[in-house]
Amino acid sequence: MDYNDTTPDQTRNVWQAVAKTVARQVRFPTFMRAVTESIIFSCVFLAAGYISLGYPITSMLAPMVPVVLIMMLSMVLSGVYREEITNSIMNLYVHSAYGFALASITCVAFVAVVEPEYANLKFTFFFLFFAFFVMNTMRPLISGTDFMDGGGRRTN
């Protein structure tokens, strides 16, 4: 059998499997959790711009909105808000790292194209580094994660 010969049914089955996986992965946070995490991302963005670039806070509000939206949508796509993920701290950290990888690539591309004055290595590193650590410190607290799960499938 030649692997280059695919039928339309095989292609459709592959796309259906991908769509099913993505649909299973995507969960939106509750309203209060979304507001809380958006505020955290916003504060880190404003602090990064103020400290690394010296920009006043009022001039950073317009570029902050799409960056925070990108960060939140990346977290949604990573599946970090799924209930079975938030019940385990290790799963939460793994999916959060996956979400930050998606967000980092998207944010860097967005900033380079739309807001080139923010495409500074110092700003980018400061924002992504501290957003990752601040969010991964706060997310288990605001999601009600079990800290004693041991990171595996076995019960304690």
Image: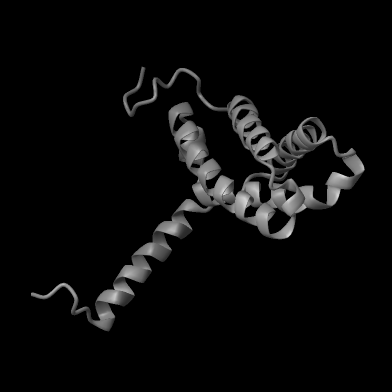
Q: Is residue 36 left or right of residue 132?
A: right
Residue 39: percent from the left, percent from the top? Answer: 76, 38
Q: Quadrant of the N terminus?
A: bottom left
| Residue found at x 60% / y 33% | 132
| Residue found at x 85% / y 47% | 61
| Residue found at x 52% / y 53% | 26
Residue 126: percent from the left, percent from the top? Answer: 67, 32
Up-down relation of residue 130 to residue 14 (above or below): above
Up-down relation of residue 93 to residue 35 (above or below): above
Q: How many marks?
A: 0
Query: In which quarter of the view is residue 44 placed?
Result: top right
Up-down relation of residue 59 to residue 39 (above or below): below
| Residue found at x 69% / y 51% | 69
Camera-side residue: 145 or 124?
A: 124
Q: Is residue 138 left or right of residue 80?
A: right
Q: Is residue 71 left or right of residue 81?
A: right
Q: Quadrant of the C terminus?
A: top left
Q: Is residue 85 left or right of residue 53?
A: left
Camera-side residue: 111 or 153?
A: 111
Snapshot colouring: one colour
